């Protein structure tokens, strides 16, 4: 509903801007091209360097295409009517969306409760010796973090449909869920050494019970695991104590809130808006791609492929990998949608005799498209594009139409825009996603240091949640890097090393939660080693002593003496993390083995 309201306000402002600009350039083709270029560059710069990022590229596309349509409006009154109809094109569906969501839309609180229940149910399944499919689903959920959950929590607060105490309780649950998942992950990795089957079953039953309560619209309180800690090995006792505390925080009644001191708000522009040339490069590349397509279909007098102009704005993103991924989804969605559209025109539309039958066809394909769009963020754009291409084919006017050239031209335009964007973004100032991965790993290692040194449970929960979210972002960047060639990014074996490093870090996070209970020499040693590893990876060098033989774990001893050796992810970093994981997990995961690290 908020998005619909924002879009209505936005289109109203844009129509006003377009009418002012159109007055000056409607009879001046050269100035129309210049105005499109200038507006496009300015808005795309804001899309990269300011808080207007989610909307600026769309605004640039609407303004540019709106000015392009002036070439078909030789009378000012026609242009005015066209812009007013464009306003209706947005406000009518926005109003319908608001009305439907008031009646049928799921409340954000309900979405949050379902997401928490899903995570608890997955954790319960894993505690019962879940199969590989459950493990994969669990790791995917853990990597997603809680960003979306906190967004729903914020929306539920804005909605004012739930008591503040309920929102506060759900906030406690959101803050604690990552800790619960990490502890379950650690218990699963060391199931033969840490936790007896009866205790695992009792924890799984408790998690399932909490999930059922959330699914029913309630909130679990007074949840407890009755098993004592006295007759358990030290590691199991520590793990069970942490699990009990995490469940208590999940279900506890919130305390009265203290006054919140708001941090200073950041400005409209990003901190590097006027120092990082990538913002200018992005605006120049996208504008160049769009204007090339604009000039191309004007010169060949083929306005039917104007979707090439729109495509350049839709697929152009900050890095080459993200751009390639998005236009790949756009191509796949367009081809599938166009194929369904052609099939409908040839085989279905000739047999339809009423508007109701046409609506059924549109509804079925729209439902499939919406199902894809509501799925994983990695493929959701394909659903939007599938619906867009199908509707362009089937809905050509107020009655069934059979003109295949319209669908053909739209698809050719989409393919042309993708090709132009690909050539420009891979050959002119390419920005690789690889360069974000190593700094991300450094920041993640330092979060683990803070987690190991944390003394309060609330601080540990917060750091664990942040670390899990950061780990998910890095994992996504590693997956995205597969879209880039080695000429732009890095050879594949280095990406494999980064993926291995992330796997080791994921395995370490649960043990580090336990280790942070003990402010001992062992915990300080582990924190120091992680901090040293982060510093070495950040600087790109590693201090080694060549006069000493390798240590028992096969790594050169790091004494802080020269000479310097290169420190890379595909070298020392993975090996160090593997040693830590071995000490924590593969040898039993016990706190008693931490001293050997």
Image (cartoon, rainbow, N blue to C red):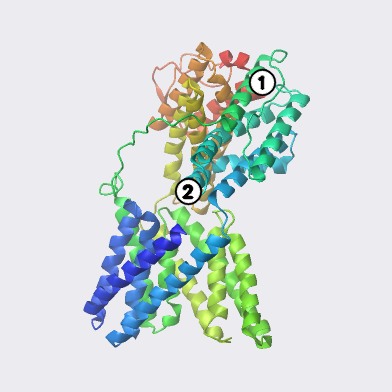
Dot in front, 2 or 1: 2
Percent position of residue 264, x then y = 30, 38
* Residue drawn at the location 55% of the way across and 43% of the way down: 144
How far apart are the alpha carbons under marks 2 and 1? Answer: 51 Å
Nearest the viewer among 496 and 116 is 116
Residue closest to the far left: 24
Residue closest to the far right: 198
* Residue drawn at the location 66% of the way across and 45% of the way down: 215
* Residue drawn at the location 44% of the way across and 20% of the way down: 544
Nearest the viewer among 440 and 205 is 205
Q: Is residue 139 left or right of residue 101?
A: right
Percent position of residue 453, x then y = 47, 20
Callout 2 secondary element: loop
Callout 1 secondary element: loop
- Give the answer, above or below, for where 70 lies relative to 532: below
Can I make out residue 420 in this image?
Answer: no
Q: Is residue 531 left or right of residue 359?
A: left
Percent position of residue 573, x then y = 50, 30
Tell me the quarter of the image containing the C terminus.
top right
Q: Name the residue tied to disc 1.
A: 587
On residue 4, which mark appears?
none
User: Which one is earlier in the sequence, the residue at label 2 or at label 1?
Assistant: 2
- Give the answer, above or below, for where 156 lies relative to 130: below
Q: Quadrant of residue 122?
A: top right
Q: Residues within 10 Å of mark 1 (few under 14, many from 20)?
A: few
- Give the answer, above or below, for where 199 lies relative to 277: above
* Residue drawn at the location 48% of the way across and 35% of the way down: 466
Percent position of residue 277, x then y = 29, 51
Nearest the viewer among 266 and 283 is 266
Q: Quadrant of residue 424?
A: bottom left
Q: How many marks?
A: 2
On residue 160, which mark appears?
2
């Amino acid at each position: 509903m908020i998005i619909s309201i924002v879009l209505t306000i936005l289109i109203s402002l844009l129509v006003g801007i377009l009418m002012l600009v159109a007055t000056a350039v409607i009879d001046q083709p050269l100035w129309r091209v210049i105005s499109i270029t200038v507006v496009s560059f300015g808005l795309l710069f804001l899309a990269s360097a300011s808080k207007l990022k989610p909307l600026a590229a769309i605004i640039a596309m609407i303004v540019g295409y709106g000015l392009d349509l002036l070439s078909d409006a030789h009378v000012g009154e026609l242009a005015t009517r066209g812009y007013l109809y464009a306003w209706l094109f947005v406000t009518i569906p926005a109003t319908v969306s608001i009305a439907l969501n008031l009646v049928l839309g799921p409340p954000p609180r309900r979405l949050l409760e379902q997401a928490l229940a899903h995570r608890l149910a997955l954790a319960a399944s894993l505690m019962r010796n879940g199969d590989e499919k459950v493990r994969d689903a669990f790791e995917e959920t853990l990597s997603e973090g809680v960003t979306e959950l906190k967004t729903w929590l914020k929306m539920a607060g804005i909605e004012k449909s739930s008591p503040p105490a309920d929102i506060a309780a759900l906030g406690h649950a959101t803050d604690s869920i990552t800790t619960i998942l990490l502890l379950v992950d650690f218990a699963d990795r060391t199931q033969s050494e840490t936790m007896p089957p009866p205790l695992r079953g009792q924890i799984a039953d408790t998690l399932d019970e909490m999930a059922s309560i959330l699914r029913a619209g309630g909130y679990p309180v007074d949840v407890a695991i009755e098993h004592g800690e006295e007759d358990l090995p030290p590691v199991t006792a520590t793990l069970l104590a942490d699990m009990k505390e995490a469940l208590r925080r999940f279900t506890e009644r919130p305390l009265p809130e203290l006054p919140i001191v708001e941090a200073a708000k950041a400005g409209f522009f990003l901190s590097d808006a006027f120092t990082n040339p990538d913002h200018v490069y992005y605006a120049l590349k996208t504008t160049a791609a769009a204007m090339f397509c604009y000039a191309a279909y004007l010169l060949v007098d083929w306005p039917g492929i104007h979707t090439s102009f729109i495509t350049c704005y839709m697929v152009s993103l900050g890095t080459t990998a993200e751009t390639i991924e998005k236009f790949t989804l756009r191509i796949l969605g367009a081809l599938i949608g166009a194929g369904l559209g052609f099939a409908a025109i040839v085989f279905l539309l000739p047999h339809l005799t009423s508007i109701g039958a046409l609506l059924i066809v549109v509804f079925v394909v729209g439902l499939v498209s919406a199902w894809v769009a509501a799925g994983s963020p990695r493929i959701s754009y394909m659903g939007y594009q599938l619906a867009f291409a199908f509707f362009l084919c089937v809905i050509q006017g107020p009655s069934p139409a059979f003109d295949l050239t319209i669908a053909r031209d739209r698809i050719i335009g989409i393919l042309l825009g993708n090709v132009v964007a690909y050539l420009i973004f891979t050959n002119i100032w390419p920005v690789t996603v690889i360069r974000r991965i190593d700094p991300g790993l450094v920041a993640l290692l330092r979060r683990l240091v803070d987690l190991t040194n944390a003394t309060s449970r609330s601080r540990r929960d917060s750091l664990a949640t942040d670390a899990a979210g950061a780990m998910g972002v890095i994992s996504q960047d590693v997956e995205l890097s597969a879209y880039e060639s080695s000429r732009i990014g890095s050879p594949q074996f280095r990406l494999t090393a980064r993926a291995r490093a992330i796997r080791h870090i994921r395995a370490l996070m649960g043990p580090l939660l336990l280790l942070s209970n003990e402010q001992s020499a062992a915990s300080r040693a582990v924190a120091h080693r992680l901090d040293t590893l982060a510093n070495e990876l950040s600087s790109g060098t590693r201090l080694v002593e060549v006069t000493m033989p390798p240590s028992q774990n096969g790594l050169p001893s790091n004494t802080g003496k020269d000479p310097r050796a290169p420190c890379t992810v595909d070298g020392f970093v993975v090996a160090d993390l593997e040693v830590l994981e071995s000490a924590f997990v593969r040898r039993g995961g016990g706190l008693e083995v931490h001293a050997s690290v």
